[in-house]
Amino acid sequence: MAGPRPGEAAQSAMSTRPRSRPGDFDYAGPPRLSAVLILLYPQDATLSFVLTVRTDTVAHHKGQVSLPGGAWEKADASLAQTALREAEEELGISLAGAELLGELTGLYIAPSHYELRPYVAYVASQPAFRPSRDEVAQLLRVPLAALLDPALRQVETWTLRGREVEVPFFDLLGHKVWGATAMVLSEFAAMLESAGASPNPAD
């Protein structure tokens, strides 16, 4: 995480084409700030991270696969704290002992009008997840090595908001992980590859 961030160049590899832009929607005022967390932890002698399948009752991105996170609140001292707080609430865990490793490149999410800041943290043991029933329909415990497997990156043509677009996605545990979540994971994967990192915590 101490090295340079590849930024938009890495994000764009997993961006829908063409991507939604601010002018595609009629919003008043600036976007709302939000943060998500890539939470790394050891599982079965390898590093893993967790994704959530959102319920059909959440305000945005119903039923989609997301990183834990949410909107900044006035009580949050920073967006990093937002990411940790929201992850605690969604996953039903304490991150008091988590090591915050760093921040990835932010991005704007046009359909929900959010400015997203991604963070990466590490905990030394596998958490006992108790996900929020209101927000999380399913937890996906994903081996970090999956992000480095080119066979799990695919592209399909979908119809979104009345137009055909090419949608790159990660095929993770039988779920299509696309959109902003895929873009965040794409940059993180690029950083792992450039650093020659191993998904094995023993390394």
Image: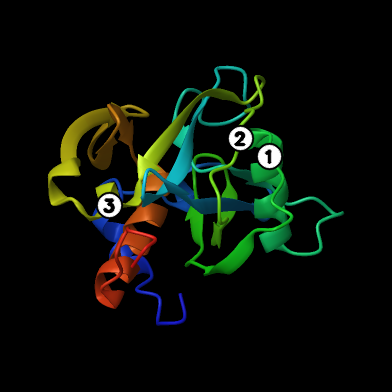
Element under disc 2: loop
Amino acid type, callout 1: Ile
Amino acid type, callout 2: Ala
Q: Which residue is mark 1?
A: 93
Q: Report the mark closest to the observer, 3 or 2.
A: 2
Residue 56: quarter of image: top right
Q: Which residue is mark 3?
A: 145
Visual colour scheme: rainbow
Residue 186 location, x and y as percent? 32, 57
Badge 1 crowding class, 10 Å Cα cut-off, few under 14, some 14 to 19, many 20 or more, is some
Badge 3 crowding class, 10 Å Cα cut-off, few under 14, some 14 to 19, many 20 or more, is some
Q: Nearer the viewer, residue 24 or 137?
A: 137
Quarter of the figure with the N terminus? bottom left
Q: Earlier in the sequence, mark 3 or mark 2?
A: 2
Is the residue 81 above or below the residue 125 in the image? below
Badge 2 crowding class, 10 Å Cα cut-off, few under 14, some 14 to 19, many 20 or more, is few
Q: Which residue is mark 2?
A: 128
Q: Earlier in the sequence, mark 1 or mark 3?
A: 1
At x 72%, y 45%, the residue is 94
Residue 33 can be seen in this image: no
